[in-house]
Amino acid sequence: MTGLVGVMEKANEVARRATIALGSPGVVAEKSWSAVSAILPVAEGVIENPIVFDFGVVPNKAYYPSDFPVELPLERGYIRGAVDGRNTGDYRQPFTITVEFIDPNGVARGTSSITSDTSPGATISGLTDQVILDKVGTWRLHATLEG
């Protein structure tokens, strides 16, 4: 072996022996455990304080559960409904409150939702969009609270 070719062959032979002698680096052992299961606590809450706002009169008027059902003329102006959802649990959690009117034909009207992190004992308030009374019959104020 002479010259550059000889030097290269010698270097390759040394590299092969070094690789064999040292072994390949890497992970020797690995193991994992299912140690913790993080869960979202069960949401606990109540819906309370329903109010119907009548914007068809001046001044505007608010009606409370003791006034229900309220008789209002058709298409006089718009109404809105509001309710509170209260976190009765022990943990701060995201709650979504959805509020709507259900017209006499069973169709949801003025549906509106809001989501907020709610501390224990705190409330999240929902308010419907504007609704025009355009059907004769009983309109239901409906709310859901999701956690």
Image (cartoon, rainbow, N blue to C red):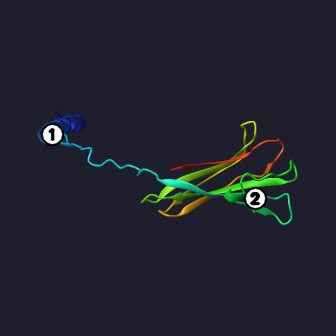
- The circle drawn on residue 53 is 2
Q: Determine the CA span between mark 2 and mark 1.
A: 80 Å
Q: Is residue 60 left or right of residue 83?
A: right
User: Residue lying furthest bottom in this view?
Assistant: 59
Residue 43 position within the rendered picture, expressed as x and y whole percent measured from the top left: 46, 52
Q: Is residue 26 left or right of residue 53?
A: left
Residue 45 position within the rendered picture, expressed as x and y whole percent measured from the top left: 50, 54
Q: Which kind of residue does numbered mark 1 sit on? A: Gly
Element under label 2? strand
Q: In this view, does 29 lie to the left or right of 53?
A: left
Q: Which kind of residue does numbered mark 2 sit on? A: Phe
Of mark 2 and mark 1, the one earlier in the sequence is 1
Element under label 1? loop
Residue ID at (71%, 54%): 68
The reply to whether discs 2 and 1 touch (Cβ–Cβ < 8 Å) is: no
- Seen from the viewer's position, the closer of residues 18 and 36 is 36
